[in-house]
Image (tube, grey):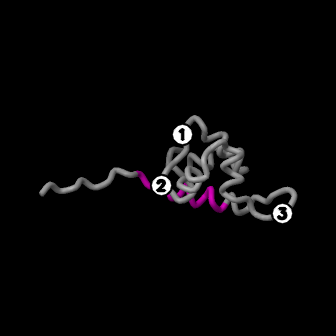
Amino acid sequence: MKRRRPSKRRDYSKLGIFLKEAREDLRNEVTRKPLSVADIADKLGESKSFVYQVENGTRKPKDSKMGMWASVYGKKHQELWKRLDRI
């Protein structure tokens, strides 16, 4: 029986936790309730499942879209790069 190789899946949990906390701080302008994953997904033009995976640290946005993600979450793009240990 062949041994399975360990997964090469990257851990993006620092970025995910940061984005999830940022989303929970954002409020709907009308209802004043925290924004949902679906609200963020609509603003980004991404699927809800992808945004959920990013916030849970299993995926990350494309490098070219980090600025857009930062603006939707109300953060500076440098803060996102720091969570990925690239700055």
Rounded to the nearest whole Å, what is the CA distance between mark 1 and mark 2? 13 Å
Distance between the alpha carbons at the discs numbered 2 and 3:
29 Å
Between residues 60 and 53, which one lies in front from this camera angle?
A: 53
> SS of the residue at dot 3?
loop
**Relative vertical location of residue 56 with respect to residue 50 in this rendering, above or below:** below
Q: Which residue is mark 1?
A: 62
From the top left corner, tell me how far across and down residue 67 is, in percent: 65, 40
Q: Residue at x 79, y 64 (%)?
A: 33
Figure check: 68 above or below 4: above
Counting from the top left corner in percent of width and height, residue 64 is at 58, 35
> Which residue carries the number 3 mark?
32
Say what amino acid the circle numbered 3 marks: Arg
Q: Which residue is pictured at 70% across the width and 63% down the height?
A: 24
Q: Which residues are magenta?
A: 10-21
Secondary structure beneath dot 1 equals loop
Q: Nearer the viewer, residue 76 or 2?
A: 2
Q: Distance from label 3 to label 1 (Cα)?
A: 30 Å
